[in-house]
Amino acid sequence: MKKNITKILIVSILAVTLVFILTACGGLNNLFRNGGGSDNTQTDGGGTKGNDDNGGNKSDNEDKDAPPVFSFATDSWATIAAHSASGKANAVYSVGDEKIIELSTGEKVTLQILGFDHDELSDGTGKAGITIGLKHLLAATARMDSISWYTNGWGASLVRTVTLANIFPQLPQDLQPLIKTVSKNTMIGGGPSGGQVPIALQTHEDKLFLFSRVEIDGTTLDFYKDEGNQYEFWRTVRNGNVSSQRIKLLANGFGNATDWWLRTCNTAGAGAAATRISASGTFTDNTSPANFSGVSFGFCL
């Protein structure tokens, strides 16, 4: 009798234990099915998504549909040129945006966007989408010309025909073929007594160019006003009419402040003197082109 009771107790205990185990397994199974949580989410490879249509799937779709992020600082030159050609570069980039490049010599320079749809393309098809210029100056100074009077003007100047011509192949290889040829106006004339050149406005086709006075301060003076139009950069980012904001430093900003050349010729007074901006930011228009000054050039895409 005692043996039968013992057997009954053992069977009862085993039955209860089995029920408990089965119940526990069922809970674990549900737990695993629900991805380890008490809500209705499930793992899906790299992330967690909700079971409803507006849950995790929505954020994934939003990521896929989000417009690409463009940056002048990091975009390739091909991408930047494509935006320029589209006529909508100003919807992607801003005046004053900067980009650092390295010349083949190892020298680094910082570029800035000066304006959009500003410079006339030399082929007559309209305006270049973006104008870009150096933020500061190259490491080395240069002569505007080898003679004492600027009678040769910008077109035949040493800085245009030699200095900038030598810099162009130093630019990044993927940038060079994208640079547009634009038309730049410059006054010429004047000179020493007895040898004056007739005053006239000349137009030259340039890939790299120096800036004129009016492109910086928007002057209305007769001898300068026809050499272009003020860039937006000098109206909205810096004030081209304030001397301190025209100061530039050698070696991409790591050197000393120094004079820097403009392509403008002073045809007034004695005439045929080169124009530059001094180390303190003032315009000096009685400079011999044979002097050495800083170089800050621009180009268009």
Image (cartoon, rainbow, N blue to C red):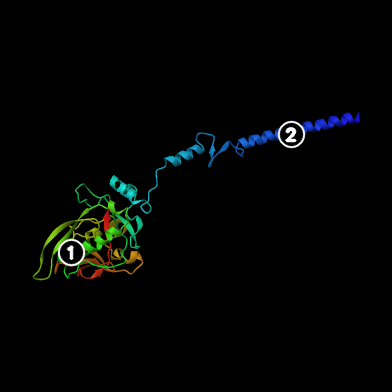
Q: Please name the amino acid that badge 2 sits on.
A: Phe
Locate residue 225, reporting x and y percent.
18, 58
**Image quadrant assignment for residue 229:** bottom left
Mark before the other along the chain sequence, 2 or 1: 2
Residue extending farthest left: 194
Type of amino acid at the residue the image marks with label 1: Cys
Crowding at mark 1 (Cα within 10 Å: few <14, some 14-19, many 20+): many
Residue 26 shown left or right of residue 3 in the figure: left
Of residues 300 and 265, the one nearer the viewer is 300
Which residue appears at 57% of the width and 37% of the height? 41
The residue wearing badge 2 is 20
Q: Quadrant of the N terminus?
A: top right
- Residue 86 image position (x, y, % from top left): 29, 45
- Examine the rendered structure and indicate whether residue 70 appears above or below residue 160: above
Q: In this orientation, does residue 166 appear?
A: yes
Which dot marks residue 222? none
Q: CA distance from mark 2 to mark 1?
A: 100 Å
For this orientation, the residue located farthest to the right is 1
Q: Quadrant of residue 284?
A: bottom left
Is residue 301 visible in this depiction of the protein? no
Residue topped by disc 1: 265
Give the SS element for disc 1.
Answer: strand
- Taking the image as shown, residue 9 lies to the left or right of residue 121, namely right
Residue in the image at 48% along x and 40% along y? 60
Looking at the image, do the residues carrying marks 2 and 1 touch, with CB atoms under 8 Å apart?
no
Counting from the top left corner in percent of width and height, residue 37 is at 61, 39
